[in-house]
C-alpha cells in the first residue's frame, strides 16, 4: 500500500496522475466568513493553503426563486486523505443550509509544492 500523501507515482505506475491532492471550493456571503473558514481549516491542518477570491456574483435557483448575490470563494489546497475531515469542518462551520463544497482532483503539480501540501496537512 502506498502513502496517500506521497506525491510521487507508485512503483510500476504508468506515469498517469493518481490525484492524491485536491482543491476544494466553497462560497460564503462575506469576506469575514471566508477568512474565518480559511483560518479554521489551516489551524486544523485540513488544508495547507486557502485562497479567498474577491466577491463574485452568483445567480442560482433557491426555493423556486432565482436569486442573485455577492459571494466570496474560498479555495482550499489539501490531500485526498484530509478531504472527509475538511468537508465535515465546512459543513459544521458554514452558515448556509446547503453549502457549496466541490472537490477537484489535482492531476499534475510541482513536486515541491505537493510535498509541502502533504506536510502541512499531516
Image (cartoon, grey):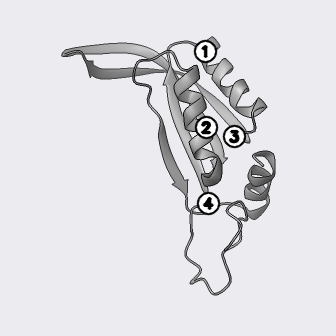
Figure check: 48 above or below 3? above
Residue situated in front as seen by the camera: 110 or 49: 49
Residue 83 visible in the shown view: yes
Circle 2 — which element? Answer: helix
Q: Quadrant of residue 67?
A: top left
Q: Which mark is residue 86?
A: 2
Question: At x 60% / y 83%, what residue is drawn?
Answer: 13
N-term mark: 3 or 2: 3
Could you tell me how far apart the alpha carbons at marks 4 and 2 are, in whole angstroms? 15 Å
Query: Residue at label 1?
Result: 33
- Name which residue lies at 56% across and 23% down: 92
Q: Within 10 angstroms of label 1, few (less than 14), some, or many (20 or more) residues?
A: some
Which circle's residue, 4 or 2, is located before the other in the chain? Answer: 4
Label at residue 56:
none
* Disc 1 secondary structure class: helix
Q: Are marks 3 and 2 in contact (CB under 8 Å)?
A: yes
Task: Kindly identify which residue carries mark 4.
Answer: 20
Q: Give the image location of residue 14, x and y in percent.
A: 56, 84
- Neighbor class of circle 4 (other Cα within 10 Å; few <14, some 14-19, many 20+) is many
Find numbered disc 3 in the image and state the secondary structure of the residue it sits on.
loop
Is 47 above or below relative to 29?
below
Name the N-terminal-most of marks 1 and 3: 1
Task: Inspect this view and state whether residue 73 appears.
Answer: no
Residue annotated with mark 3: 47
Amino acid at each position: 500500500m502506498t502513502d496517500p500523501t506521497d506525491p510521487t507515482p507508485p512503483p510500476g505506475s504508468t506515469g498517469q496522475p493518481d490525484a492524491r491532492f485536491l482543491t476544494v471550493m466553497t462560497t460564503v456571503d462575506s469576506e469575514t466568513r471566508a477568512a474565518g473558514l480559511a483560518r479554521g481549516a489551516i489551524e486544523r491542518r485540513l488544508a495547507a493553503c486557502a485562497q479567498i477570491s474577491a466577491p463574485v456574483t452568483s445567480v442560482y435557483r433557491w426555493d423556486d426563486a432565482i436569486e442573485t448575490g455577492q459571494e466570496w470563494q474560498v479555495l482550499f489546497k489539501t490531500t485526498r486523505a484530509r478531504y472527509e475531515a475538511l468537508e465535515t469542518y465546512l459543513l459544521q462551520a458554514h452558515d448556509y443550509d446547503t453549502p457549496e463544497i466541490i472537490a477537484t482532483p489535482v492531476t499534475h503539480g510541482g513536486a515541491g509544492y505537493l510535498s509541502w501540501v502533504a506536510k502541512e496537512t499531516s
